[in-house]
Amino acid sequence: MENFDAAPKKSKKLKKVSPGVFVVGLIVVLAIILALTSFFEVDATEQAVITRLGKYNRTVGPGLQMKLPLGIEKSYNVPTMVVQTEQFGFQADEIPQEISQENKPEEARMLTGDLNIVDVEWTIQYKIVDPVAWLFNVSDKQGTIRDISQSVINLLVGDRAILDVMSSERSSIEALAQDYMNENFDQLGLGINVTTVKLQNIVPPSGVQAAFEDVNKAIQDMNGFINEGKAAYNSEIPKAQGEADRQIQLAEGYAVERVNKALGDVARFNAIYDDYVKAPGVTKERLYIEAMEEILKSHTQSTIIDGELDNVLPVKTLGGNKQ
């Protein structure tokens, strides 16, 4: 009997709650719900994109922001000031496993322009510059970033020899890769800007490492011999060039001398010819005398004999003396 009496007493206590109190409580609950769904905070490194009934409405900056409650407007915080990193071919220890990609060594293996295989590890860093495009234009954002990055690096490595990729062309590949990636991301409307492309380790696969080192050493030896040959060439060529210049100068001097002598002979001949025209007999005799004078100058002892005489005894030659 006591149990039956207790139940009516409890029901009487419940009936004592007035409708006004219930309404107030309901209003308080609704106010809390409205407050919780109307206000949100945006970090200093973020921008928030707000949609109204699923359609883009506006973008707001850092601080405490307000939106229409009860899901009418939704907010999406986007880290626009954070530099984000993607790694390829390796995984750094300091990056948490839950936010990093699974290590995939096969993505590092590439074919160079001279048909060698090389393992290339690299990183890219990017920032989100258009939060609206980042949220709505591409669904698989990270996959798209990785696919395009790998495609660009494959293209650039495939255009170059392995030794160039490992040494002189590293900076060129990094700069071109950044430009090509940004062009592709802009075409897709991904809303990001690649700020850095950095090549890390570039090595042949472990299975051919020893053979590659032998080939590389042979190439270095070949380059050493080529450099020695060029040094010898550069040493001898100036000497040969100097000797050639000297011979050319001698030849030019000789040519000038011969030309001047020829011009003098021509002038002398013309002068003699003019005299001959004026006085042929006198000119002949003068030329004869001058010719004899030149001949006799080279002979210290000479004897002139009349050509019409016969039986001339050469007295001067009898004692072995020269005439």
Image (spheres, grey):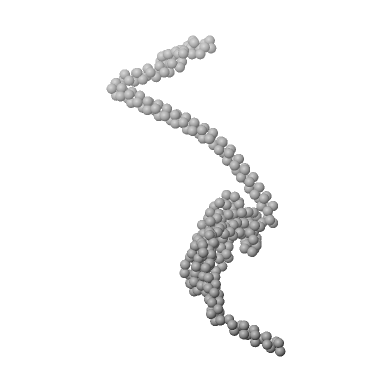
Q: Quadrant of residue 282?
A: top left
Task: Work out which quarter of the rendered image holds the N terminus and state it.
Answer: bottom right
Horizontal and vertical percent position of residue 49: 50, 66
Horizontal and vertical percent position of residue 152: 55, 60
Q: Residue at x 59, y 60 (%)?
A: 86
Would residue 255 be found to the left or right of residue 280 on screen? Answer: right
Q: Nearer the viewer, residue 57 or 162?
A: 57
Would residue 263 be found to the left or right of residue 180 on screen? Answer: left
From this viewpoint, which residue is outermost toward the left? 278
Q: Quadrant of residue 98?
A: bottom right
Q: As displayed, is residue 17 above or below residue 101? A: below
Would residue 12 be found to the left or right of residue 35 on screen? Answer: right
Asked if residue 17 can be seen in this view, the reply is yes
Asked if residue 185 can be seen in this view, the reply is no
Horizontal and vertical percent position of residue 12: 62, 85
Q: As displayed, is residue 202 above or below residue 11? A: above
Q: Nearer the viewer, residue 194 or 15?
A: 15
